[in-house]
Image (cartoon, rainbow, N blue to C red):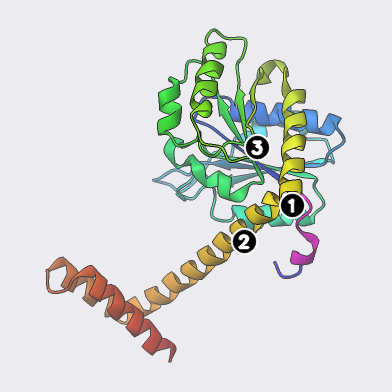
Amino acid sequence: MAALAPHTGRAQVVGLTGSPGVGKSTTTNALVAELRRAGRRVGVLAVDPSSPFSGGALLGDRIRMQDHADDDGVYIRSMASRGHLGGLSWSTPQAIRVLDAAGFDVVLVETVGVGQSEVEIAAQADSTIVLLAPGMGDGIQAAKAGILEIGDLYVVNKADRDGADQVRRDLRGMLSLAERRDGAWRQPILKISAARAEGLDEVVVELGRHHDFLRESGELLRRRTRRARQEVEAIAVAELRRRWADVGRHGALEGLATDVAGGALDPYRAADALLAAHAGAEG
């Protein structure tokens, strides 16, 4: 990571999220083709869910993207979520950095599709595409899932089906209720048919417009700084947990947990004692 750091910050990171069944993999495949027609080099991180029993993952998105298997300008990496909440793999930020440093113009991150935990993608991407489709529940369900707050572009897939116009109207109505400060980005609502490769050119144009807006408004730097802060914090917390586990092996954590379970100690005082034991072990 230290060697890669000076070569990062050039790629546009695009997150693609939405509920299971809306066609994320098909849309990603079609979007890659459209970006390649525009002369962009594209890296894809496709995060698949891990089995809660075996810990394995099918990693099937590469099977769906065989159209790009022989294209030197496309790199596709499937990743297992390993049970990590939020629809992303724990190592996604590091993988994004590797593809950025490798010279890809666009890094597409396709999430697992886990509904109400999908919002984590907004913390990792410069631009977030929220994908919806007719027949996947009404607009209230989309609002409940929490994804209406994170989108920079809203894309209604399977636009050839009945109900696509209604989904678009519902989205427009809900977005119109949101408070906007002056000069804020107005999220476009686009209709596509990924299976027919229709409407993807508009998505690429709007992604370019949004990236220009982010740069000119200073929001791009703010988003990337926030992303870096969260990444540093996550790494630090993971290291603390590892060290606490070491403390726990000496009996401190287990004894504190027993005291809390038995009512002899409250969890806040137990946490203070664990921190003190960690500090003592460090000393």
Question: Could you say whether the residue bearing mark 1 is in a helix, strand or loop?
Answer: helix
Other residues around mark 3 within 10 Å, as few (<14) / some (14–19) / many (≥20) = some
* Nearer the observer, 122 or 249: 122
Tag of residue 32: none
Q: Earlier in the sequence, mark 3 or mark 2?
A: 3
- Residue 1, placed above or below residue 104: below
* Residue 42 on the magenta span: no
Q: Where residue 116 appears, x then y in whole percent?
A: 43, 38
Q: Is any atom of residue 125 visible in this view? A: yes
Tag of residue 185: 3
Q: Where residue 41 appears, x then y in whole percent?
A: 82, 41
- Amino acid type at circle 1 is Leu
Q: Where residue 224 appears, x then y in whole percent?
A: 66, 55
How far is the residue under mark 3 from the one under mark 1? 27 Å
As drawn, is 93 to the left or to the right of 274?
right
- Amino acid type at circle 2 is Ala
Q: Which contiguous range is marked in magenta?
A: 5-11
- Amino acid type at circle 3 is Trp
Q: Earlier in the sequence, mark 3 or mark 1?
A: 1
How far is the residue under mark 1 from the one under mark 2? 16 Å
At 69% from the left and 55% from the top, the residue drawn is 221
* Tag 1 residue: 99
* Tag 2 residue: 228
At 57% from the left and 45% from the top, the residue drawn is 122
Q: Point out the frontmost of discs 3 and 1.
A: 3
* Residue 6 on the magenta span: yes
How far is the residue under mark 3 from the one under mark 2? 23 Å
